[in-house]
């Protein structure tokens, strides 16, 4: 019985080492692909459960005095229904406001007098 107990930790360590090596090899394989798209940050990863942008999304830009904790990939909603996502947050040309760029599903028609507000 003592031999059996002693083998289990070694077997677990071996399985852990193999998993770690496999993960390392996968990361190395992804990192050296010459045709891989450039990765600039976690903001590029779409959030699960986000809006379906459809085949022809369009871009909308809004400016805010304060974007609070808004982040790229945040949901864009119309009447509490997710219709798009934030793609970029930059400073406006005057440097005093935040310019928020969003992608909206092409089937959603925003009225000419639509306005944007931030909610948490």
Image (spheres, rainbow, N blue to C red):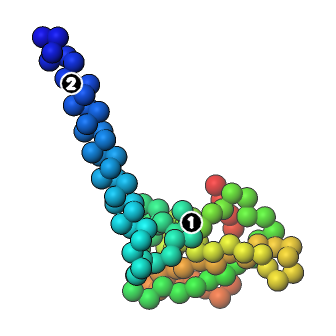
Q: Percent position (x, y) of residue 52?
A: 41, 74
Query: Which residue is the site of mark 2?
Result: 8
Q: Percent position (x, y) of residue 33?
A: 39, 75
What is the crowding at mark 1: few (fewer than 14 residues within 10 Å), some, or many (at least 20)? few
Instruction: Select label 1 or label 2 by which is in front.
Output: 2
Q: Percent position (x, y) of residue 5?
A: 19, 16
Badge count: 2
Quarter residue 116 falls in: bottom right
| Quarter of the picture holding the C terminus | bottom right
Q: Can residue 115 be seen in this view?
A: no
Query: Which residue is the site of mark 1?
Result: 41
Element on which disc 2 rests: helix
Q: Is residue 13 left or right of residue 110?
A: left
Front one among 5 and 85: 5
Q: Does residue 88 lie above or below 93 as drawn?
A: above
**Residue at 54% in and 79% down:** 103
């Amino acid at each position: 019985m003592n031999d059996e107990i002693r083998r289990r930790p070694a077997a677990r360590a071996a399985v852990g080492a193999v998993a770690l090596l496999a993960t390392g090899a996968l990361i190395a394989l992804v990192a050296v692909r010459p045709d891989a798209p450039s990765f600039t940050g976690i903001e590029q990863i779409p959030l699960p459960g986000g809006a379906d942008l459809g085949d022809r999304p369009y871009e909308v830009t809004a400016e805010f005095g304060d974007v609070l904790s808004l982040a790229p990939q945040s949901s864009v909603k119309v009447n509490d229904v997710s219709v798009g996502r934030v793609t970029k947050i930059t400073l406006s040309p005057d440097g005093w406001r935040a310019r928020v760029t969003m992608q909206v599903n092409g089937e959603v028609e925003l009225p000419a007098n639509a306005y944007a507000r931030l909610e948490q």
